[in-house]
Image: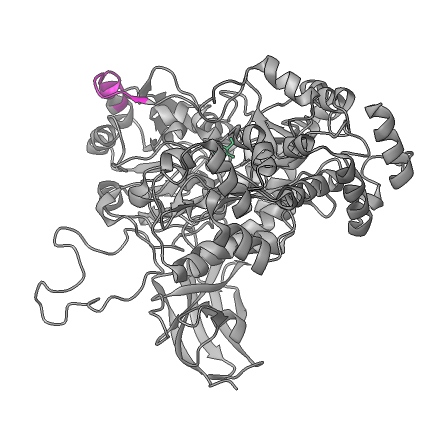
Amino acid sequence: MKKQFLSLLLLGLIAVACQKPGTNTTSQNDSGINTKVEALLSKMTLIEKIGQLNQYSSRWELTGPAPEGVDSMSLYNMVKEGKVGSMLNVTGANATRKIQAWAVDSSRLGIPLILAYDVIHGYETMFPIPLAEAASWEPELAKKSSRVAATEASAVGLHWTFAPMVDIARDARWGRFMEGSGEDPYLGAKMAYARVKGFQGDDLSDETTMAACAKHFAAYGFIESGRDYNTVQIGDPTLHNIVFPPFKACVDAGVATFMNAFNTVNETPATASSYLQRDILKGEWGFEGFVVSDWNSIGEMVPHGVAVDKKEAAYKAITAGSDMDMEGNAYINNLEELVNEGKVDEALIDDAVRRILTIKFKLGLFDDPYKYCNPEREKVLRCDEHLAAAKEAAKRSIVLLKNENDLLPLKKDGLKIAVIGELAGSKDVPLGSWRAKAITNSAVSLLEGIKNVGGSSSIRFAQGPAYTEGLRSFTTELNINTTDRSGMSEARLLASKSDVVVIALGEDCWQSGEGRSQTDISMKGFQQELLEEVYKVNKNVVVVLMNGRPIEINWMAENVPAIVECWHLGSEAGNGIAEVLFGDYNPAGKLPVSFPRAVGQQPLYYNHLHTGRATNGEGNVFWSHYTDQSKEPLYPFGYGLSYTTFDYSNLKLSTNELTEGGKIVVEATITNTGNVAGEEIVQLYIRDLVGSISRPVKELKGFEKIKLEPKESKVVSFEITTKDLEFYGASKEWKAEPGDFNLWVGPNSAEGMAASFTLKKMN
Ligand code: NOJ
């Protein structure tokens, strides 16, 4: 009966039975889809509708605490009864086909499931963690990585990724820093837009694309004291001017879904916030996709203390615009009763169902629910082409922080190179956290990369004291070795007999990610001691940093001659890093985040407000500073060196007065003053000197990455219009306020050529 209905539906309304997957244009035709959605909706019982709002994880792969009362058998039965609309954490063309068949063949209406997974920076081919990739300042690169990730994930039957994570982060104590694009809303918005385009392509029904999900709406990156799942207190201007822009960029890119957040925002859980989900997202921004809760974030309203039980939580969440309940059991167990009691209007449920069905139609799942489950396509996983793309992304995400006396690049012949540190030998750490189906130990280690690229150099390895001990995994706490020093003297001896030491230090990848907040962001275990021991016997030290967040590296920055920020760079990390170390690729990345001098500076970000006492005019203590440490970052946002040097000159503004509808063309000449070709990321910042509310000391408003041959010059130009000057101010709307502005064009947020202009009063 149900199969008959589905066939009729498909034949009668779609009439596309013979089309090949990906060529069905009707699935992109919104009015056609609306008709199909309405037809289907009219056949659904209330509980079937609520079923569409219900999502469960497979029981064999959990990415959060398992809720009570759902085992594999009950899940199977619920899918067959049409009480599940989506599942997460089912992967593999065969497994997804099997589970899809439960829904399509056995439920009354045969509505396909939408299958989701956290494909954050690759599926099996791992790309740099998103924070690292943001250091490339190349949205096109991020788009390409996401395209590859979607190609792999869609080949194993997945339709939907819980990415991009676009939370602006300002506090390095937060473990999820690694998942986003750093501290800046402008750069964050560019990367967010590109990633959505990469995952979704131009046509959701194409079998190599998947629905993207902008998360976590909103302000998760502002959790107090960097402790995961904690409270957020945030002012309206910061919410609008800093937190929202990357989310809005996702809407502009046509993102299919949003995920809300665990945290409260000013005392209201984001999941219960009508302001966020209805007024802003679905109202002001006109978002037509659906919102999924975060893992049991509806149920978590009970411990948050805003609902007495899950029934009240369900009421609050559906009212506020949360369309799908991830792993919470709150909707499926309570919404029917809430409707029958007249507390929830069925129209709210219809709206959520419509949104979900629409995305399922757009994905083409009603044309062929199995179109993504094709074992033949699985051969794309970790194919050579994808690995080559991963290597390209890896090297382009590297930031050269220090290079005294041109220690780098290293010569490829005749050098005795000591490679030191557990991270240098690790084939696992570079894969990063939130690594989808990366195969354990499948990355090219730094040591392997150096051997691959290092020519005839003599390359020796010493691990030094073990960094971690015991189980390393996504779901367990990491154990850092703090007792066993063995390996220290071997490392020291090797360093003493070598010409140069390449030492990998920083963080194991399981130190960052969800649930991995830290109060101490310095190097853990014996790493600092190992560095100092090695440095005592050999001053030619190159530190390769591997980390998922900014870390404290003051001693290193002061003492060792070369530091290369290499984050967690994915499957091809070692090859990418080695190409930089030996000069096959001239590093060009710039920091997407300020590097602190001390954890006590957190939250630290370049686009802060000006205090009333920013400088010490009188030599006394009464100004905004620390008495034991500089208030400035160790390395500012936007900072990064190259094997060449760039000169900035000739800053010109087409006019110093901007009027409504007009523009200022800003030009600067950049010259490669060194002897090798290199790329430079030229950055434009502004400051609005006086506003209806206090404005940041600097705001990024443009950037361009250019390549220059030795001695070559290029003129880089930016355009400034009133749109670029708009912000959410005292009037509670986005608008530019007339007055004076400063402007800088430079290599990072702390340096640059300065000019000023005036925005004339508008009518
Ligand atoms: C919780 C995380 O916050 C979210 O980002 C993720 O997508 C879900 N778990 C599903 O794994």
Name the one closer to the observer, 112 or 712. Answer: 112
Q: Nearer the viewer, residue 623 or 257?
A: 257
Q: How is the image coloured?
A: one colour
Looking at the image, is 703 positioned above or below residue 761?
above
View extreme (front): residue: 341
Is 2 displayed left or right of 621 in the figure? right
Locate residue 413 relative to residue 505 in the image: left or right.
Answer: right
Q: Quadrant of residue 15?
A: top right
Image side of residue 165 versus residue 524, left or right: right
Residue at (55, 15) in percent of width and height: 71
* Whether residue 89 is situated above or below residue 128 in the rendered picture: above
* Residue at screen point 67% across, 18% down: 95
Which residue is located at x 50 percent, y 51 percent?
A: 274
Task: Based on the picture, tell me whether residue 16 belongs to the magenta stretch.
Answer: no
In this view of the protein, which residue sits in the foreground, 62 or 33? 33
Q: What residue sits 58% from the left and 57% below the top?
A: 283
Q: So how many labels did they put on this image?
A: 0
Q: Position of residue 684 (x, y in %)?
A: 45, 66
Magenta-colored stretch includes residue 488: yes
**Quadrant containing the N terminus in the rendered view:** top right
The boundaries of the magenta stretch are: 479-491
The percent coordinates of residue 466 (x first, y second) are 30, 19
Q: Is residue 678 visible?
A: no
- Give coordinates of residue 205: x percent, y percent: 76, 40
Residue 177 visible in image:
yes
Work out which residue is located at the far left of the displayed protein and give it. Answer: 620
